[in-house]
Image: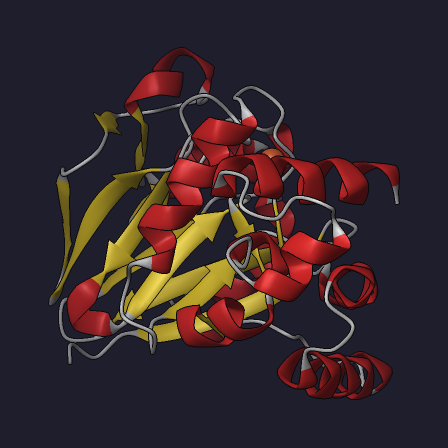
Amino acid sequence: MAKLEIEQFPCLSDNYGVLIHDAAANLTASIDAPDAGAVGRALAEKGWRLTHILTTHHHADHTGGNLALKAETGCKIIGPRGEKGKIPGIDQAVGEGDRVPFGAVEFSVIDTPGHTAGHITYWGPNAGVAFVGDTLFAIGCGRVIEGTPEMMWQSLQKLMALPKETAVYCGHEYTQANARFALTIEPENAALKQRAKEVDQARAAGKPTLPTTIGLELDTNPFLRPHVPAIQQRLGMVGKPAWQIFAEIRERKNRS
Ligand SMILES: [Fe+2]
């Protein structure tokens, strides 16, 4: 495993900023840039110099800090090819299958459209980590804003196929509300009930519930579980295609 230091910090109202650092190569990347001030403070605290921003999608709460951070540090901004025109300061556009070398880590880009039309995920197989932006959340998933539910389901399936132990960093701390909703979809899931308790405890103590892992999400995230008979029965959708069941769960979450 490549050695990668990772610093996660809350910013804006419910976003997470994430810095990754390869000490040997003296490289530091910000995963998205929700807020230049918060990213700058986190860099100063660690004593790291920003060299890259890896953008997952164009939303302002993921790119709002791009130009100020670039002006301060001269960092290189890498972002999704499908949203090239919407990413402030972008230097390099990437998409499915592209490699993004970062010191000892080589990220593989996965197209994960649905939340936005060009959303991408950065997967670092040799660091055991994935930065999924607003595609997958702990016990939830992003709203389908620019894509279709079928497209979002295809994107989620790509993430579901990653190694179970992969550490997953997401754009927002939504886990507590997600757990409450998930229990309405699959109240008999013992792993989910246990996790909901742990999430409540973590939040009461002011602690983050992220990163999560692919394995934990496969076991507890209803959006990844349309194949489960109890869920199909509850929704009155036994035997329906997975993407339709996913779409129904997403629709119910939107209304919750
Ligand atoms: Fe977003």
Q: Position of residue 37 (x, y in %)?
A: 63, 49
Colouring method of the image = secondary structure
Ligand 1 sits in which quadrant? top right
| Residue at the image position 44 percent from the left and 22 percent from the top | 87
The quarter of the displayed image where residue 70 is located:
top left
In which quadrant will I find the N terminus? bottom left
Residue at the outermost front position: 239
Q: Is residue 65 visible?
A: no
Residue at the outermost top position: 85
Note whether 246 is above or below 113 in the view shown.
Answer: below
- In front here: 164 or 187? 187
| Residue at the image position 63 percent from the left and 59 percent from the top | 222
Q: Position of residue 66 (x, y in %)?
A: 48, 34
Q: Position of residue 38 (x, y in %)?
A: 63, 54
- In front here: 149 or 201? 149
- In front here: 93 or 111? 111
Q: Is residue 226 visible?
A: yes
| Residue at the image position 81 percent from the left and 59 percent from the top | 181
Q: How many numbered dots are placed on residues in this image?
A: 0
- In front here: 140 or 73? 140
Q: Position of residue 46 (x, y in %)?
A: 46, 74
In which quadrant will I find the C terminus? top right
